[in-house]
Amino acid sequence: MSTQDIQMTLAFFAIMTYEDVDGVYGEQTSTAVSVYQSWRQNHLEMDGIAGAQTQTDMLWAVSQVQSKLGVAADGYVGNQTIQAVKNFQAAAQVPTTGYGYANRLTVERLGLSLWDS
């Protein structure tokens, strides 16, 4: 995954914003990766580094959401996935900001349990 792909995943799960996606792996991205890792603490070491295990886990988590939304489950966040989240949130009356974030409530309403804590 590229740094931009990692950031898109972090934004998708409402850890960052889509506006923060800049392709630069700096302190903000490292902190956001640590948050993601803490959510998946039974599966990942919390070190702020998006290494192979963290990237594989991110791809898996996104693909789980994509499968529930009925879009291509490739693990990468793009416009089709974001729009599918928006459509689901509107249909399920999930409170949102309108940006297509798969926040915890959205993930739960999809019938998924992705987070360890």
Image (tube, rainbow, N blue to C red):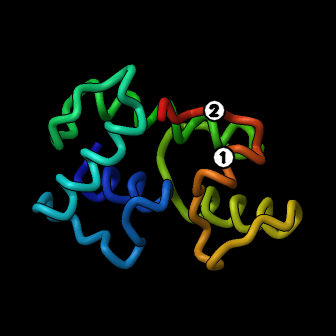
Q: Position of residue 103 (x, y in %)?
A: 58, 57
User: Relative to 92, does residue 110 appear above or below in the rendering?
Assistant: above
Quick one: which residue is furthest to the left in this view?
A: 26
**Crowd around label 1: few <14 · some 14–19 · many ≥20 (10 Å):** some
Residue 26 screen position, x and y as percent: 11, 62
Q: Which kind of residue does numbered mark 2 sit on?
A: Ser
Q: Is residue 62 left or right of residue 89?
A: left
Quadrant of the snapshot with the N terminus: top left
Quarter of image, res 58: top left
Q: Residue furthest right?
A: 91
Looking at the image, the residue that sits furthest to the top is: 42
Separation of residues labelled 2 and 1 (CA atoms): 7 Å
Residue 15's x, y, as percent?
Answer: 40, 59
Residue 54 horizontal side relative to residue 90, left or right: left
Provide the residue designation for mark 1: 107
Residue plotted at (48% across, 61% down) = 14
Determine the residue located farthest toward the front in the rendered image. Answer: 117
Q: Is residue 50 above or below residue 53?
A: below
If you read the primary sequence from the N terminus, does the residue marked by circle 2 or circle 1 appear first? Answer: 1
Give the percent coordinates (x, y) of residue 51. Answer: 19, 32
Q: Element type at marker 1?
A: helix
Residue 77, above or below 93? above
Tag 2, which secondary structure? loop
Q: Tell me the residue at 62%/34% (across/down).
A: 64
Left or right relative to 55: residue 25: left
What residue is at 30 percent from the left and 25 percent from the top?
Answer: 44
* Quadrant housing residue 96: bottom right
Mark sitting on residue 98: none
Q: Which residue is mark 2?
A: 113
Residue type at mark 1 is Val
Residues at circles 2 and 1 in contact by the CB criterion of under 8 Å: yes
Query: Crowding at label 2, few (<14), some or many (≥20) Cα neighbours within 10 Å?
Result: few
